[in-house]
Amino acid sequence: MKLKELANVIESIAPVPTQDSYDNSGLLVGNMQDEITGALVSLDVTEDVIDEAISLGFNLIICHHPPIFKPLKKLNGSNAVERCIIKAVKNSIALYAAHTNLDNSLKGVNAILAEKLGLKNIAVLQPLKGMLRKIVVFVPESHHDIVRNAMFEAGAGVIGEYDSCSFNTSGKGTFKAGVDTDPFVGNKGELHTESEIKIETILPSWIENKVVNAIRKVHPYEEIAWDSYSLTNEFPQKGAGMYGELPEPVEERIFLEKVKKILNIPFLKHSPLLNRKIRKIGICGGSGNFLIHNAIEQECDVFITGELKYHDYFLTEEKIVLVEAGHYETEQFSKELLYSILKEKFSTFALQISGTNSNPVRYL
């Protein structure tokens, strides 16, 4: 199996263009055309994780945290990152990371955390903006169904839980074919008026080329009139953090004890309890302090994330309980998530969750 096949499945859930601007997701070491003997799924890439892949005879590590996060200026093995990259290259092991693009997915890191916590009615806490476009194409009446369906099949026209969404307007198009053309309708050198349909639909920016190519394959005109616009709409299926509800309200301490047990940690750091039952929960695996105000705006009773700064705790204003549960702990299920995504598609492929504990934090 080629690496590209595995990457395509991951990116159908977590497209690389949805990563945050500072991130470095995607293929970091290797080639998309590499033949893969097996893949190890890990939260981090350490030397021990690479040794584990070598012992299994696997030549791909799929991780959540990209080992190359900051630019590398040299490769002489002077630090852990350089040693990992050198070892991976020497042993022909490809490294693929799904980081904030997996965080920003409605089926990503926060979705599985919400599932583990038993949350229902989940939604994105801070939807992405600037990721949607509107595409408009003008089609002769004889071909509007063919072109529209091709656009839908390429992925356009999805709004929330609805697909095949478009708006269609009838009108008259005019054009004059030049001497070197072969017009579908009309005659060379004569002004022609044609009854046309203006098709408008929405699409994520990263599939625009795919949609345009689909149009070109079925549109009858030599020269296709089409427009593309950037939208300011939020993208509710992509973004940071999530919120959801417990099936029934519970006491704060009972819920926090449940969180400890699910995440398998000895203690939780939290802001002062508010002595009230809680039901609405905000979550963000990893570092999510930038979402505190979003959780308050959504009237969450509790916001759980991996890391908080000292002064973050002053932002509660007795409106919310903040819970700091550990970076590794809140993202540990990403291994299970990536494994299940790939195993569902490639049931017989050699795939294994890493048994190496890569958490650098210890508790006394």
Image (cartoon, rainbow, N blue to C red):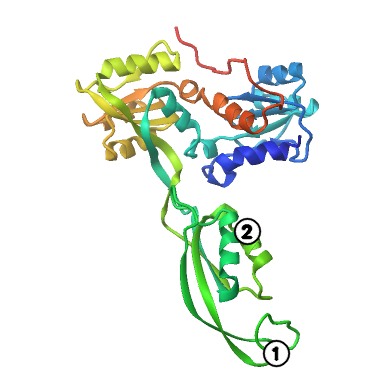
Left or right of residue 44: residue 1:
right
Secondary structure at badge 1 equals: loop
Nearer the observer: mark 1 or 2; the answer is 1
Residue 32: x and y in percent read: 74, 40
Q: Which residue matches tag 2? A: 209
Q: Position of residue 156 (x, y in %)?
A: 54, 56
For the residue carrying disc 2, how many other residues have a C-alpha within 10 Å: few (<14), some (14-19), or many (20+)? Answer: few
Q: Foreground residue, 205 or 160?
A: 160
Q: Quadrant of residue 277?
A: top left
Disc with the residue nearer the chain's start (1 vs 2): 1
- Across and down, in percent, residue 72 comes to 67, 35
Identified at 47% across, 39% down, the residue is 106
Tell whether 43 sits left or right of 109: right
How many residues crowd mark 1 within 10 Å: few (<14), some (14–19), many (20+)? some
In the image, which disc is placed on residue 188? 1
Near-viewer residue (191 or 240): 191
- Residue at 56 percent across and 40 percent down: it is 13
Quarter holding the N terminus is top right
Q: Nearer the viewer, residue 24 or 14?
A: 14
State whether residue 307 appears in this view: no
| Vertical placement of residue 181 versus 220, above or below | below
Q: Where, quadrant-wise, is the C terminus in this rendering?
A: top left
The amino acid at mark 1 is Lys
Amino acid bearing label 2: Asn
Looking at the image, residue 169 lies above or below residue 185: above
Q: Position of residue 171 (x, y in %)?
A: 48, 80
